């Protein structure tokens, strides 16, 4: 299918906007506001869980975002927590005791998990109520949550478009108002990409800020970080502060609760064009340059910056993706019964085949990827933060990045889309996606990204608070 055919198909599909905000126990509250209402006794956790479950069923009927619904919400018996009673979902690549972990794949039948993953325990420590698990593309490899078989996860801003990936199910539910926050994780942009596609806040923490990811810590380079997607900056800030009470990495500066902007004015580097040469589309470029002007109006200093990474970075990261697919194919039986790597989708199979043909390059690939931290550090000389797009273009129509697209074409399209986010995964640095001040002419959100030095989540959150206060993020209810 050509791009023009996909665009035509997208126009023909109902341009439906889906949200489930209503006058119930959740109202328009974010997670911080909802937890406060529960503490004050204005609503009960049971009422919130009941109404959230009804919202989820309504949203999921049109968005296909949920992998597993819990018939009985999993209340966490805690002494409170910042998010006590707040409904949420766990992404289906993370174990929740008693539920199968499917990783978005048809290549095996998953077994029920015997225990919670380490991050699940950290999430539960905040007091949340888990309502189920959200869908992701196979093994989290794709920047869209689509499948060779079965319905895609749809974007609530426009159901003919991608919700992003790999945390697409979580982002769709949060953007639609079904729950205020949901679990997401990021191995190449998988928190920030769906946040950008769905008009959300998505912070990828510094490596080690949250508990080590079970999959990531087994890799030669740990590129995976866990967190949440949210509709407000304060929810992402409150989650990290609460999570730190459960696990504090002594190698990183303590974060604590960030509650608003700082007085300090920042030196902000502006990066509009991708280091991999992918062209930034007009809508995205306009969103980033408009954000730069707003920052200058707030008395920050904005200057162009260059991120001079190795020209082979994109090819190397693709090879690393292939290594991950190869390892999954080789060890898949540990995930469930009757694992058949031949039933992995077209993207996974293509990545694996590409790696097998080039496996001897692995030592050089790992060496060059590890050196990326030197180029990243050089870009920050004289800068506090770097502003860039999240993605090279706005979220595409469903089908453009489907795993059914021939592999060579699909990879070309992915690399022309995911052109900014992977560097932070390789280096291990924090990065946040924020909604731009306005949507595109056809009503789609655009994300802008701020990246920082290792451990600089406080700086990113303070800046995010300032932009949110300066101009409210676009609302799906008002669009």
Image: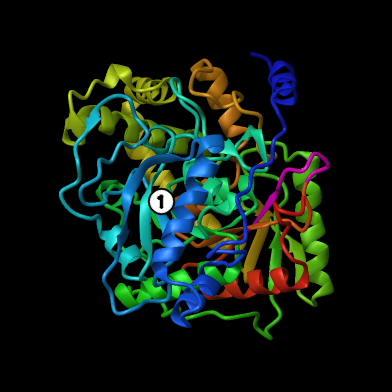
Question: In the rendered structure, which segment of residues is drawn in magenta?
Answer: 440-449
Q: Residue at x 25, y 45 (%)?
A: 99
Is residue 144 in view from this perspective?
no
| Pick the front one: 11 or 306 | 11
- Using the image, determine if residue 298 lies above or below residue 276: below
Percent position of residue 261, x then y: 65, 80
Based on the picture, tell me whether residue 441 belongs to the magenta stretch. yes
Q: Main secondary structure of the magenta part?
A: loop
| Pick the front one: 49 or 156 | 49
- Using the image, determine if residue 197 lies above or below residue 376: above
How many numbered marks appear? 1
Q: Quadrant of residue 202?
A: bottom right
Q: Which residue is mark 1?
A: 370
Percent position of residue 210, x then y: 36, 65
In the image, taking residue 30 as reference, residue 126 lies left or right, namely left
Query: Can you name the residue that lies furthest to the bottom here?
Result: 263
Q: Quadrant of residue 353?
A: top left
Is residue 385 in view from this perspective?
yes
Q: Residue at x 80, y 77 (%)?
A: 299
- Using the image, determine if residue 60 lies above or below residue 347: below
Secondary structure, mark 1, is: helix
In the image, taking residue 168 as reference, residue 387 lies left or right, namely right
Based on the picture, tell me whether residue 171 belongs to the magenta stretch. no
Q: Residue at x 52, y 60 (%)?
A: 180
Percent position of residue 10, x then y: 70, 25
- Using the image, determine if residue 286 lies above or below residue 101: below
Percent position of residue 120, x then y: 30, 58
In the image, taking residue 161 as reference, residue 67 lies left or right, namely left
How many neighbours does mark 1 have within 10 angstroms: few (below 14), some (14-19), or many (20 or more)?
A: some
| Pick the front one: 225 or 66 | 66
């Amino acid at each position: 299918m050509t791009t023009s055919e996909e665009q035509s198909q997208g126009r023909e599909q109902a341009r439906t906007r889906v949200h489930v905000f209503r006058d119930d126990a959740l109202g328009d509250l974010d997670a911080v506001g909802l937890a406060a209402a529960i503490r004050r006794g204005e609503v009960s956790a049971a009422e919130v869980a009941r109404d959230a479950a009804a919202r989820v069923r309504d949203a999921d009927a049109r968005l296909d975002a949920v992998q597993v619904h819990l018939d009985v919400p999993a209340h966490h018996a805690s002494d409170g927590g910042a998010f006590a009673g707040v409904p949420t979902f766990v992404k289906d690549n993370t174990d929740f005791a008693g539920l199968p972990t499917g990783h978005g794949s048809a290549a095996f039948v998953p077994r029920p998990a015997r225990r919670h993953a380490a991050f699940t325990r950290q999430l539960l420590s905040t007091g949340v109520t888990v309502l189920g698990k959200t869908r992701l593309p196979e093994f989290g490899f794709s920047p869209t949550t689509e499948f060779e078989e079965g319905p895609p996860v749809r974007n609530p801003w426009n159901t003919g478009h991608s919700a992003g990936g790999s945390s697409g199910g979580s982002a769709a539910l949060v953007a639609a108002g079904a729950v205020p926050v949901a679990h997401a994780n990021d191995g190449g942009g998988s928190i920030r990409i769906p946040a950008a596609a769905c008009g959300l806040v998505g912070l990828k923490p510094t490596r080690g800020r949250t508990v080590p990811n079970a999959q990531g810590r087994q890799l030669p380079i740990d590129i995976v970080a866990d967190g949440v997607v949210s509709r407000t900056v304060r929810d992402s800030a409150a989650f990290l502060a609460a999570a730190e009470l459960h696990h504090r990495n002594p190698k990183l500066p303590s974060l604590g609760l960030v509650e608003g902007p700082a007085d300090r004015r920042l030196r902000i580097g502006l990066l509009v064009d991708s280091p991999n040469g992918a062209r930034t589309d007009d809508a995205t470029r306009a969103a980033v340059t408009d954000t730069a002007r707003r920052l200058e109006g707030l008395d920050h200093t904005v200057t162009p910056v260059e991120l001079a990474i190795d020209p082979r970075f994109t090819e190397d990261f693709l090879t690393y993706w292939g290594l991950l697919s190869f390892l999954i194919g080789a060890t898949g039986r540990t995930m469930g019964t009757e694992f058949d790597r031949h039933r992995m989708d077209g993207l996974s199979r293509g990545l694996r085949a590409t790696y097998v043909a080039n496996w001897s390059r692995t030592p050089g690939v790992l060496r060059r990827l590890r050196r990326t931290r030197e180029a990243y550090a050089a870009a920050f000389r004289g800068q506090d933060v770097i502003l860039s797009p999240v993605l090279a273009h706005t979220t595409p129509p469903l089908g453009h990045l489907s795993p059914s697209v021939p592999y060579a074409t699909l990879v070309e399209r992915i690399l022309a889309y995911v052109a900014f986010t992977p560097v932070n995964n390789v280096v291990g640095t924090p990065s946040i996606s924020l909604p731009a001040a306005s949507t595109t002419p056809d009503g789609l959100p655009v994300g802008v990204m701020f990246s920082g030095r290792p451990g600089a989540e406080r700086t990113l959150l303070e800046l995010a608070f300032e932009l949110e206060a300066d101009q409210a993020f676009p609302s799906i209810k008002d669009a």
